[in-house]
Image (spheres, rainbow, N blue to C red):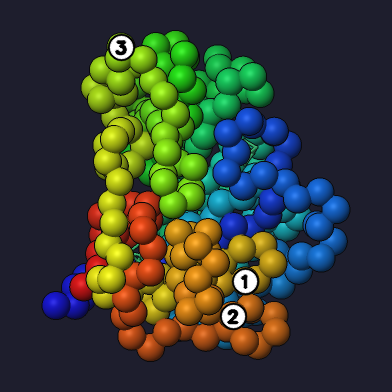
């Protein structure tokens, strides 16, 4: 039966550009391709055209705050009553982050910050996090990819954040995003720590979800769109390159949402924020 208490949502990978170069990045830069992408602010007209009502927009990258006019884009989306979640490596200045918080106001749903050892100074990052938490309280969290061999160190870092009242998650370096969903190998002790620590989503360390063949509203009430304007039912369907799951492109007028729930073609589903939290997509 259809759950009427859901909010329509989409994941927008706004850029491939990033100032960091993490080995575990799942959205690495495509050098040389950048000039082919439409400017992100050009998406605003398309959102106006294609999205009716208020949607929750998950903005990720690359690093969204590197996008020219990003604050203006966020402001306009918020003025159109869309709710925003942004994934950032928190390298922007506190002034810029404060401005973002101010312009998005009540329509800021969450800032999900990722901490990357080797690129960020932990004490500075913690200071910035505390300031942001003061502004938006529980709408802010920090996550770190738990690299094998570093889980203890990372859990200790996490504890520093928790001690300051900040939600902190370990994210297992798990997905190969292929058909096998392999995860990295952790020692027995590390598995114990990971299982005790709050993980980034509600998927447990060794658990994968599969809804293949079930009716799912991804494609009608949720979709993912990349920096080129190509839209898919969801990220797993995009990885699968399943033709029936392609919804078209925002810029060549081929984009169209499905009118109803369709069967899931994917072996694994990792759309945790939609499936398991508020927006149960599976019927
Ligand atoms: S900060 Fe995020 S987007 Fe940038 S390289 Fe690292 S994992 Fe990738
Ligand atoms: S169940 Fe998950 S993987 Fe399958 S179509 Fe829905 S969102 Fe995509």
Q: Position of residue 85 (x, y in %)?
A: 46, 53
Q: What residue would you read off at disc 2?
A: 248
Say which label, 1 or 2, has the lower sequence index. 1
- Left or right: residue 253 compared with residue 5: right
Pointer 3 and pointer 1: residues touching (CB < 8 Å)?
A: no
Q: CA distance from mark 3 to mark 1?
A: 42 Å
Disc 3 to disc 2, how far (Cα)? 46 Å
Q: Residue at x 27, y 41 (%)?
A: 207
Mark 3 surroundings: few (<14), some (14-19) or many (≥20) residues within 10 A: few
For residue 221, what is the image quadrant?
bottom left
Mark 3 or mark 2, earlier in chain: 3
Q: Is residue 193 above or below residue 279?
A: above
Circle number at residue 189:
3
Picture coordinates of residue 231 (x, y %)? 56, 72
Numbered badge on residue 230: 1
Ligand 1 has an atom within 8 Å of the beta carbon of the residue at disc 3: no
- Contact check, label 1 and label 2, Cβ < 8 Å: yes
Give the quadrant of ligand 1.
top right
Q: Quick check: marks 3 and 2 in contact, CB under 8 Å?
A: no
Q: Secondary structure at mark 2?
A: strand
Q: Residues within 10 Å of mark 2 (few under 14, many from 20)?
A: some
Q: Marks 1 and 2, Cα distance to the nearest angstrom?
A: 6 Å
Which sits earlier in the primary sequence, circle 3 or circle 1?
3
Q: What residue is rendered at 19% in x and 77% in y?
A: 2
For this view, does 19 lie left or right of residue 176? Answer: right
Write down the quadrant of residue 197 in the picture: top left
Closer-to-camera residue (264/147): 264
Looking at the rendered structure, the secondary structure element under dot 3 is helix
Residue 80 drawn above or below residue 239? below
Residue 105 image label:
none
One can see residue 164 in this view: no
Residue in the picture at 73% in, 57% down: 69
């Amino acid at each position: 039966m259809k759950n009427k208490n859901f909010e329509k949502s989409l994941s927008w990978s706004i850029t491939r550009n990033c100032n960091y170069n993490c080995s575990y990045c799942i959205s690495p830069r495509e050098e040389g391709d950048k000039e082919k992408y439409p400017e992100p602010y050009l998406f605003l007209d398309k959102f106006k055209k294609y999205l009716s009502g208020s949607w929750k927009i998950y903005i990720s990258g690359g690093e969204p705050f590197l996008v020219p006019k990003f604050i203006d884009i966020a402001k306009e989306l918020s003025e159109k009553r869309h709710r925003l979640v942004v994934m950032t490596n928190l390298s922007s200045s506190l002034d810029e982050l404060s401005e973002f918080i101010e312009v998005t106001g009540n329509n800021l749903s969450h800032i999900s910050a990722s901490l990357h050892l080797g690129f960020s100074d932990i004490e500075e990052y913690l200071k910035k996090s505390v300031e942001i938490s003061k502004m938006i309280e529980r709408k802010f969290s920090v996550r770190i990819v738990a690299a094998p061999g570093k889980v203890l160190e990372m859990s200790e870092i996490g504890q520093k954040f928790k001690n300051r009242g900040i939600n902190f998650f370990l994210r297992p370096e798990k997905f190969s995003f292929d058909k096998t969903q392999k995860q990295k190998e952790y020692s027995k002790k590390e598995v114990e720590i990971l299982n005790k620590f709050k993980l980034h989503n509600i998927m447990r360390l060794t658990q994968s979800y599969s809804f293949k063949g079930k009716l799912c509203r991804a494609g009608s009430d949720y979709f993912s769109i990349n920096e080129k304007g190509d839209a898919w039912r969801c990220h797993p369907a995009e990885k699968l390159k399943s033709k029936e799951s392609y919804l078209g492109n925002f810029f060549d007028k081929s984009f169209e949402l499905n009118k109803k729930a369709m069967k899931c073609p994917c072996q694994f589903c990792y759309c945790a924020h939609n499936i398991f939290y508020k927006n149960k997509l599976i019927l």
